[in-house]
């Protein structure tokens, strides 16, 4: 699952102001930035609920593969996931050799299962034009003749060069507070700087929306902890056809220290205020293809009904993860620490242990070391067993089951293993913009992302009121199931009950306005934006999310098999309907911004 962890910093530390840079930009008040600075510091962790101890790990570090069968079984899932999330796949980051190997494995299995190739030129692969953008060090940003230092005072997010001379700077308001934002059109031709509302999720910097329309660049103040990430080379899809939608201006992250120095002691500011000094902004880029192709894998089981076989139920998961960390960590230490201090894994990346929590971590680790001498190991590979190895192998298992049916479903089933989800839903965006079957022939999409956990010791998320959510042996989260098609959501409940799957559905993460915004963070949304009814299935977050500890030996394969059997059953029901699932939800704008 993608999200904030995609730009996860190391432990956030209190920001130490750097020496004065310049005192030109009078429009940004120190008082407005104080909440941002406080939010950027790492708070001490507080126990969100009683910690349920991790159970003993009974599965091995390595597993000998067994032949898979037509049935969806825990054994088959285990065989597949130990291959797909093995260290040899090097974390499957899009555009790397590890993801290339992973997609080779999926395509080989699709062929063995008997899926019809539905990628480019009669293959199973749809290659997306993934490229690497590097900022040229000669790029510059000056205000009133004084330069800001790239990488320290500012970084840029964007894939287009900019050369702007004598541009006005404007204060755009407070992101997350629509009452303190400039009007649409006011930003045209300017560099507009925004601050964040107190307590706002840092992801709010992606949702400037119409307030930034026509701007030369958008500046966001105070997200210092994210700046190191954006100094690295960034990947993007070089898709000229995407120009048909609104083109977002480049985003500049400005350090809080630089902005503090620029404020000149201003105590009041109003959206729309303009700096007396003009800016020069030159953004120079170097762009190259990724070392290895980034590929969606696409295959079809053809439907049995001559009239309905030209329609498709789409099923998918993402084949990529986040690769290899630059430095190894002690695997067991990190796993126990996160379970006690950061139960959401990367979602809780800024939390630090209290003294009581650290004492508990030390005790649990010491007990484990005593019971498992000589097993300590450094680890730098983000295997992504649950995220989204579990979804990828689940799609394979479901495909094998459906392909083995003597009587195929009436509609065709199209299976898509999307690439680049962790880099911003790149593969699913590309597939839905450039589908290999007619887009309007897709009647529904069922998405699986992180379906391998959801046990009682996992904190799977929080309800909108802060209530802690926990898993169980029957646990399954559903997101978006009733948003576009009430009929599709109701069908999921009917199939679960009437066919005796007896799963316990949790809809808490699907609440309107939920700050975690899960509805917008996996591939189903890219289908939903084209008004294709979707359901997103997940067993939720956990302390191994986006960590090197997300490995196959911690997956609950029996639980995953139950979930997969239900989703396969639902897919067949949808494929056999005598009509398309009725779309009765609000009409979506394919080029609009997503808001849960």
Image (cartoon, rainbow, N blue to C red):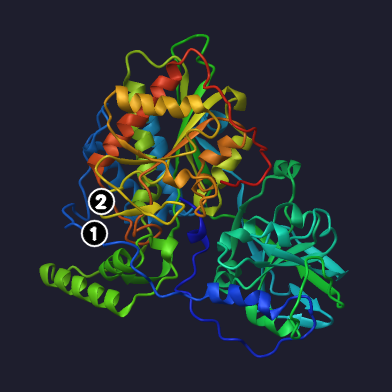
- Residue 503 image-quadrant placement: top left
Check disc 2 and report the residue beneath it.
456
Residue 336: horizontal and vertical position, in percent? Answer: 27, 67
Q: Which mark is residue 52?
A: 1
Q: For residue 408, which quarter of the picture?
A: top left
Of pointers 1 and 2, the one earlier in the residue sequence: 1
Q: Is residue 255 visible?
A: no
User: In this rendering, would 562 be left or right of 275?
Assistant: left
Which residue shows up at 74% across the image and 72% down it? Answer: 139
Q: Decide: is 155 above or below 116.
A: below
Q: Vertical placement of 493 versus 366: above or below?
A: above
The image shows residue 269, relative to residue 65, as above or below, that is below
Image coordinates for residue 318, horizontal then vertical, percent: 45, 44
Number of other residues with Cα within 10 Å of mark 2, as a class: few under 14, some 14 to 19, many 20 or more: some
Picture residue at 28% right of the left edge, 29% below the top? 501
Determine whether, in the image, residue 565 is placed left or right of residue 6.
left
Badge 2 marks a residue whose secondary structure is loop
Q: Nearer the viewer, residue 345 or 133?
A: 345
When the figure is inspected, residue 451 is found, relative to residue 209, above or below; the finding is above
- Look at the numbered discs 1 and 2 and tell me whether their residues touch, using CB distance below 8 Å: yes
Q: Quadrant of residue 452?
A: top left
Q: Residue furthest top?
A: 306
Task: Residue at 60% x, 73% y: name it.
Answer: 36
Query: Horizontally, is 244 left or right of 95 in the view?
Result: right
Residue in view at x 64 percent, y 82 percent: 257
User: Which residue is at the far bottom?
Assistant: 19
| Residue 311 drawn at (x, y percent) | 53, 19
């Amino acid at each position: 699952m993608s999200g904030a962890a995609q730009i996860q910093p190391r432990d956030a530390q209190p920001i130490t102001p750097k020496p004065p840079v310049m005192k030109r930009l009078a429009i940004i008040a120190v008082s407005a930035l104080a909440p941002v600075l406080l939010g950027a510091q790492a708070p001490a962790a507080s126990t969100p609920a009683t910690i349920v101890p991790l159970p003993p790990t009974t599965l091995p570090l390595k597993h000998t593969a067994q032949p898979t069968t037509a049935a969806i079984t825990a054994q088959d899932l285990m065989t597949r996931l130990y291959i797909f999330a093995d260290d040899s796949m090097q974390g499957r980051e899009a555009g790397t050799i590890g993801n290339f190997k992973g997609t080779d494995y999926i395509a080989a299995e699709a062929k063995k299962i008997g899926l019809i190739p539905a990628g480019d030129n009669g293959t199973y692969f749809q290659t997306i034009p993934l490229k690497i953008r590097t900022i040229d060090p000669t790029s510059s940003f000056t205000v009133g003749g004084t330069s800001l230092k790239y990488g320290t005072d500012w970084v840029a997010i964007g894939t287009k060069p900019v050369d702007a001379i004598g541009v006005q700077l404007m204060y755009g308001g407070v992101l997350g507070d629509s009452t303190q934002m400039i009007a649409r059109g006011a930003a045209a031709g300017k560099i507009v700087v925004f601050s964040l509302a107190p307590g706002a999720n840092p992801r709010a910097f992606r949702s400037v929306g119409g307030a930034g329309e026509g701007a030369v660049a958008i500046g966001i103040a105070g997200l210092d902890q994210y700046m190191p990430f954006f100094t690295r080379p960034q990947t993007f899809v070089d898709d000229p056809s995407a120009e048909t939608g609104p083109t977002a201006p480049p985003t500049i992250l400005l350090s809080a220290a630089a902005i503090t120095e620029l404020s000149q002691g201003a105590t009041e500011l109003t959206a729309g205020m303009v700096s007396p000094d003009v800016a020069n902004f030159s953004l120079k880029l170097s762009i190259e293809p990724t070392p290895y192709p980034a590929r969606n894998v696409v295959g079809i089981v053809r439907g049995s009904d001559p009239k309905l076989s030209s329609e498709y139920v789409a099923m998918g998961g993402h084949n990529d993860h986040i690769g290899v960390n630059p430095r190894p960590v002690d695997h067991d230490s990190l796993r126990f620490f996160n379970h006690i201090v950061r139960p959401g894994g990367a979602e809780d990346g800024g939390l630090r242990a209290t003294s009581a929590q650290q004492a508990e971590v030390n005790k649990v680790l010491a007990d484990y070391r005593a019971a498992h001498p000589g097993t300590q190991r450094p680890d730098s590979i983000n295997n992504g067993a649950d995220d989204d190895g579990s979804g990828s192998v689940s799609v394979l298992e479901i495909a094998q089951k459906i392909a083995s049916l003597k009587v195929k479903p009436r509609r065709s089933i199209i299976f898509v293993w999307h690439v680049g989800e962790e880099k911003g839903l790149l593969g699913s965006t590309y597939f839905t913009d450039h589908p290999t079957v007619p887009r309007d022939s897709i009647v529904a999409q069922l998405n699986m992302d992180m379906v391998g956990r959801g046990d009682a010791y996992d904190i799977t998320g929080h309800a909108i009121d802060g209530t802690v959510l926990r898993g169980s042996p029957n646990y399954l989260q559903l997101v978006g199931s009733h948003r576009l098609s009430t009929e599709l959501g109701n069908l999921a409940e009917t199939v679960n009950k009437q066919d005796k799957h007896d799963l316990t559905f949790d809809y808490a993460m699907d609440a309107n306005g939920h700050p975690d915004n899960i509805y917008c963070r996996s591939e189903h949304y890219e289908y939903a934006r084209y008004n294709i009814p979707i359901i997103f299935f997940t067993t939720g977050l956990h302390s191994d999310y986006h960590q090197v500890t997300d490995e196959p030996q911690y997956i609950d394969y029996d639980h995953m098999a139950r979930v997969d059997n239900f989703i396969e059953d639902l897919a067949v029901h949808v494929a056999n309907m005598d009509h398309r699932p009725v779309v009765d939800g609000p009409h979506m704008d394919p080029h609009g911004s997503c808001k849960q």
